[in-house]
Image: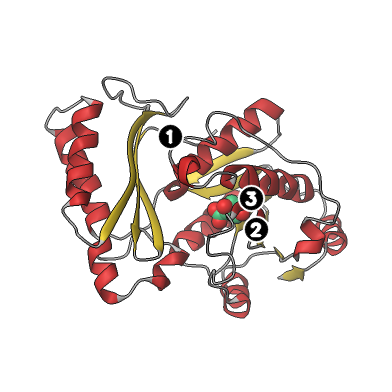
Amino acid sequence: MKACRTIASLRRALAAAGDRPVGFVPTMGFLHEGHLSLVRACRKENELAVVSIYVNPAQFGPAEDLQRYPRDPEHDSALLKKEGVDILFMPGDTEMYAPPFRTWVDVRELDSKLCGRSRPGHFRGVATVVLKLFNLVQPQRAYFGQKDAQQALVLRQMVRDLGLPVRLRVLPIVRDADGLALSSRNVYLSSAERRAALALPRSLELAKAMIREGEARSRALRKAVEAAIAAEPLLALDYVAVVRLQDLEEAPRIEAGNTLIAAAVRVGKTRLIDNLLLGDLSC
Ligand code: PAF
């Protein structure tokens, strides 16, 4: 595996690899099985597998966890080597945002709903860094996790709007044995918080069971998920949304193949998200 810290060395590594179809997994590191599921799919479906690790400051708000975001580049690098990744790109801030940096990507409407309400500017940071990474790596396929469903929808819109020659593959959420969706931020949780956090996947399981039994009213589903979360005193609800994929708006009834049930909560200082997807985010 070739590890590159600069854009120039990434370009050299890509050129040396020749004209082979490139798969790309952008990450912020502190890798878990969710990331590795993306890496494995990327390896399987492409001749050249490129992974980036970059904790992107532009997607963190001023009061968010940028400084304490978990990092373990040596361990990540060993994991990726073992998975057979060809190129690892680990740029620094001056490489990605050389001053004066003045170009930003706004994916309007989709960026200000759901997580965008409590994290203003977050999706602008994500879209900007991902577009830059796409330009540098020039992948045919890029891999993202469904846990960040709104991120996938924002990026899908960006790819469509700008005619980017990349296919987005959005792969299922990977969960721990207890049901909690894997996230690098789970390390922040105390054992009591972790137990409380399980109300989040349970609330979505409840929605799934209600749908199976014929419930199709968005409001009824949203209220049931909200109530299941509210029943856990250690959880503070950020939002529950039962929305269409194209505009993240709630329709009176859910539509098979076109519905996202997403929720975000705070447990102590940690913000967690999870979702149930009726549809496909890949494009
Ligand atoms: O999902 C993430 O880890 C990040 O938002 C991404 C896509 C790597 C951009 O920084």
C-beta proximity under 8 Å, tags 3 and 2: no
Vertical comparison of 215 with 11: above or below: above
Mark 1 Cα within 10 Å, few/some/many (few <14, many 20+)? some
Identified by mark 2, the residue type is Asn
Q: Is residue 3 left or right of residue 55?
A: right
> In the rendered structure, which disc, 1 or 3, sits on the residue that comes first in sequence?
3
Q: Secondary structure at mark 3?
A: loop
**Beta carbon of the mark 2 residue lies under 8 A of ligand 1:** yes
**Residue 156 placed where, x, y %?**
57, 34
Q: For the point 53% across and 64% down, which residue is it?
A: 65
**Residue 62 placed where, x, y %?**
59, 58
Q: Which residue is mark 3?
A: 46
Quadrant showing the N terminus: bottom right
Mark yes or no: residue 65 visible. Answer: yes
Q: CA distance from mark 3 to mark 2?
A: 26 Å
> In the rendered structure, which disc, 3 or 2, sits on the residue that comes first in sequence?
3
Quadrant showing the C terminus: top right
Q: Which residue is mark 1?
A: 280
Q: Is residue 202 left or right of residue 240?
A: left
